[in-house]
Amino acid sequence: MSKVAESIFPVSMDAEWQRIDILAQCLIASRSGKQPEQILIKDLNHKQQQVNHLRAAANNPWKKIAPDLSALAMDILACVYVVEIYPRIGWLYQELQPNTGQPFVSMALIQMLLALNDNEVLQLKHLLGPEGELVQKRLVEVNDESAFSVIRPVKAALARLLDLPEPENAPPGSIKVKIKASWDDLVLPADREVMLREFMMWLKHRDQVVNDWGGHSLGGPVALFSGPSGTGKTFAAAVIANELGWPLYRVDLARLVSKYIGETEKNIGRLFDAAHGKKIVLQFDEVDALMSKRGEIKEARDRYANMEVSYLLSRIEDHLGPCILTTNLRNQIDKAFTRRFQVVVEFPRPDVTSRIKLWQRMFPPRAPLSDDINIDLLGRSANLTGGNIRNAALHSAYLAAEAGSAIELPHVATAIWRELSKERIQIPRSDLGLLAEYLPDSVFEK
């Protein structure tokens, strides 16, 4: 191996990959009716001793991805992962299974490489089955239960094994939320912040309560954030994610729900399968669309809709990681679902004090403010949410930049007017409160 390769891959794992390389060469020789050369057999025995020593050591690298893997499980993973580390072995695999047209190993090839007996073959099928340890722990991906189906490494598990940065692939149906926020950035009533910190306790003390104290083991934790748009639900989710040091992924339920029966469950399953074992925070937006109050079942579609909700909630409860559900319409959520949430936080529209704090923070930090800008005046004028204030502050900055001046009250009044106009066509000038007199007449010109 070159020095460059040694700097990338842990040298301590070399014996694992080289052993599989030799096994593949021996099998190719056997397929050709030849006996493997003695030097190859001698090298194989030597590599096997090194592998045994490696796995018996306290710092066995396989423990990075799962602490209690059996010897056969480690052998299987070595056969699967080696093609990503020594790509040329993929060519050997293709020579051994020429009809597949791909470099990944199959269950049938693993059986031949490792020369498994009947009992070991049963263990192999169990480990790689849908409920098998290697599949459930997201260490490998198996297309189906066929003996000739390809088995692919899960890149996140391979990265952990090799001490490489884990790939940031968004789970299917989600997008990464890139908001950097801390507790100091939150503008919420004190009791709501306390509830958010209580949500963190479920993660921080899970091991103590469940393992040391014998508490009932639950998935999640799961929180419901409710409140009007722009009141900070996603922002609070970002605070929690940043506190944990984990990425936040927002799930668009519209991308998961399908009109075809059974497809919704498949999409939800793919999402949670991809998220399994990862240190991420999942946020499900506008869940009221899926968890609305259930009425009388009048047709088959109603029955399937209830099944979809039940499946989503069961996967959320089984998922060992924080899930945050958001809604603008808490009253529409079926009360039967609320017992499944560890924390329910209501995000209110900001009062005057909160609006003043938000205006203080929302202008671009290096933007020049005119002397006539009075933050208290802004907070006491229009009844805006945090999202509205953020948009208005930024819009006023662009108006000032276009005018070549500092941000002035007419710029802010105009920006607030534009923000209010998004929600209503007809707006009385009085909605601007004390800022009404600063609104330029030009905004009314047609």
Image (spheres, helix red, strand yellow):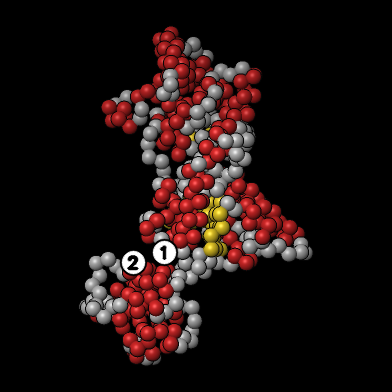
> Which residue does the image show at 63% across and 56% down from the upper left?
338
Circles 2, 1 touching at the beta carbon (< 8 Å): yes
CA gap, disc 2 and disc 1: 10 Å
Above or below, 129 relative to 286: above
The residue at which mark 2 appears reads as: 361
The residue at which mark 1 appears reads as: 187
Element type where label 2 sits in the image:
helix
Mark number for residue 167?
none
Q: Work out whether residue 425 or residue 267 is closer to the camera in this orientation and state it.
A: 425
Name the side, left or right, on which 377 lies relative to 337: left
Label 1: how many Cα within 10 Å (few below 14, some 14–19, many 20+): some
Of tags 2 and 1, which is closer to the observer? Answer: 1
> Which residue does the image show at 36% across and 27% down from the upper left?
10
Task: State the image coordinates of residue 292 (x, y, percent, origin top left).
Answer: 65, 63
> Which residue does the image show at 31% across and 83% down from the upper left?
410
Task: State the image coordinates of residue 281 (x, y, percent, origin top left).
Answer: 48, 50
Name the side, left or right, on which 275 lies relative to 352: right
Look at the image and tell me whether residue 17 can be seen.
no
Task: State the image coordinates of residue 280 (x, y, percent, origin top left).
Answer: 47, 47
Q: Work out whether residue 109 or residue 372 is closer to the camera in this orientation and state it.
A: 372
Element type where label 1 sits in the image:
loop
Q: Amino acid at mark 2?
A: Arg
> Which residue does the image show at 49% across and 78% down from the upper left?
423
Look at the image and tell me whether residue 435 can be seen.
yes
